[in-house]
Image (cartoon, grey):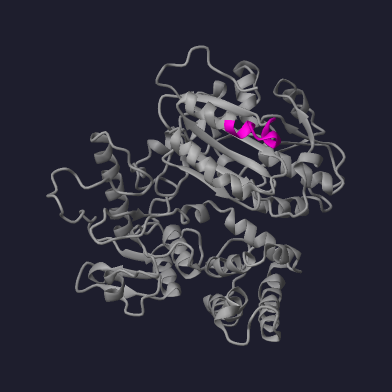
Amino acid sequence: MPSTPASPTPSACLTAALYLFVDLPDCAALREPLQALCDAQGVRGMLLLAPEGINGTIAGRPEGVQAVLAWLRSDPRLARLQHKEAWGERQPFYRMRVRLKREIVTLGVPGLQPALHAGTYVKPEDWNALIDDPEVVVIDVRNDYEIGIGSFRRAVNPGTRSFTEFPAWVDAERRPGGLLAGQPRVAMFCTGGIRCEKSTALLKSQGFGEVYHLEGGILKYLETVPEDGSRWHGDCFVFDERVSVGHGLVPGHHRLCRSCRMPLGAQELASPLYEAGVSCPHCHGSRTPGQLQALRERERQMRLAAERGQEHIGAKLPSTPPATAPGAAAPRPPSLPVLYSFRRCPYAMRARLALAASGQACELREVVLRDKPAALLAASPKGTVPVLVLPGGGDGEGGDTVIDQSLDIMRWALQRSDPGRWLQPSTGEPLQAMLDLVAACDGTFKQALDRCKYPGRYPGLEAGTPGNAAAWATADGWIAQALESRLATQYWLFGSHATLADMAVAPFVRQFAGIDAARWEAGTWPRTRQWLAGWQALPLFDAVMDKYPAWREGDAPVIFAGA
């Protein structure tokens, strides 16, 4: 049952974390009414809907949050939905988003049924006795940066950067000499319990007999177990503006670096390498002077918004100050590149991914392709997105420089800053090998993809004709030969970490997978499916997929920095 403080203050903000694995084949029909209800109640946060259930965190006035929870539970399938509560003095989210996903927590292993095959629940008050047993392997299934600020004594850190890497870690540790060799007793835990539902189901599907997980996750443990009897050390990372919580779910002592998104403790905040909103010991030295200037401008705009009593929503600049003359154009931040983009275009998607990964801020202008703005056509007469306009040639001198090819935008951004080593494959292969794969995607695969997705545009390729069948065969064959074969021995296309090739190709494979979901799931490319799911589960993917209204001349600038 949710916990409620004895006497929350009248101005308190209620945060509710929730999830439930349940069959929701019509989840798409729930999205719009749920979004509308949250907006009407002033509730913010993130809710994910998928055929396998619901997951998310929302916050707002207590009566607003309770209204949303009541609406959800009015659906008989969600009647047993439980949630965890925490109280604070301010709203921890900037906006409300209800999103449709393939999985409510992405593991990338098809066929798992956590609602039926999860491990054995262990109540928080019984957890200490289990993990004190030296014969039990205790596994923290969270990501590496979360574990870095706190965990249980004796817990194993798999060193994963995303949950989709966990199955590969399990496979490696099941081999002779590994931690999981011989199928020992295993105890798993995560923040709220949802990842353990899937990770324990994964082990059970592989024959493990005794698999346990912490009921309610770390948050329930910190809420229930007294600090003087706790086995927990440090803080627990949470995915909202609180950043971390401690025993009793009181806000922790961490802040988030607005440049690299790493949680920062007292020592890091006191470091001379820390500058609020700009850099920290984790990312210091990885930004160009232009990027640092853009980050400082964003931080300045946030301070100005706070002084005016306004909210700085995400990366959008505040409205034009009252001092601006009526009808005057909104002020532009100095010397920022301008990116013309379209959210769903795979070419624009790959460009945004690289810009965000490099930390390169820019002014984003969302384009409606049937009504292209004159400024876009003046910059690039071909009128397609993405287009990146560099003021003063990118160096502050001379006229503007225009880059209107997506791959060129990616390389421009990554050559300025490449903290994720997208240009350095762990396989040791040259950059040209990645570029060759991208060229094949943009050529052979893209041509077949278009014919599969839009057969009516190509005479003689109508659905069901031999020509259309040939297009599908070409697309299928390219995935099998170019992607599935590479992924047979490694998690990403060029080794142990994502590269330019993954980020340039995945948007097109995502588009192909969406043409016929059932056909995609039945295809003979299980590793490619897992790779695509892992890519879509990256925080970076969510960061570049926010929706923006179409840009019009004179609109207030929207600053895009992948945040």
Out of 166 and 74, give the one closest to the viewer.
74
Q: Quadrant of the N terminus?
A: top right
Determine if the magenta segment contains residue 443. no
In-front residue for pair 154/455: 455
Q: Left of 456 or right of it: where is 375?
A: left
| 397 relative to 306 in the view: left or right | left
Q: Residue at x 28, y 74 (%)?
A: 379
In the picture, residue 440 is in which quadrant?
A: bottom right
Looking at the picture, tell me which residue is in the foreground, 351 or 159: 351
Identify the residue at image location x=20%, y=70%.
Answer: 397
Residue farthest top in this picture: 6
Question: Which residues lie in the magenta part?
Answer: 71-80
Placement of 292 over or under 451, stated as above or below:
above
Q: Determine whether, in the image, residue 264 is placed left or right of residue 80.
A: left
Residue 300: percent from left, percent from top: 26, 44
- Residue 255 lies, in percent from the top left, at 43, 36
The residue shown at (71%, 73%) is 485
- Residue 277, quarter of picture: top left
Q: In this view, does 434 lie above or below 297?
A: below
Does the rendering let one see residue 140?
no
Q: Main secondary structure of the magenta part?
A: helix
Left or right placement of residue 59 versus residue 111 in this view:
left
* Front-lying residue, 278 or 519: 519
Q: Check residue 72 for magenta coloring.
A: yes
- Total count of labels: 0
The spot of residue 467 in percent (x, y) is 67, 86
Residue 15 x/y as whole percent: 51, 29
Query: In this orientation, does residue 89 appear?
Result: yes
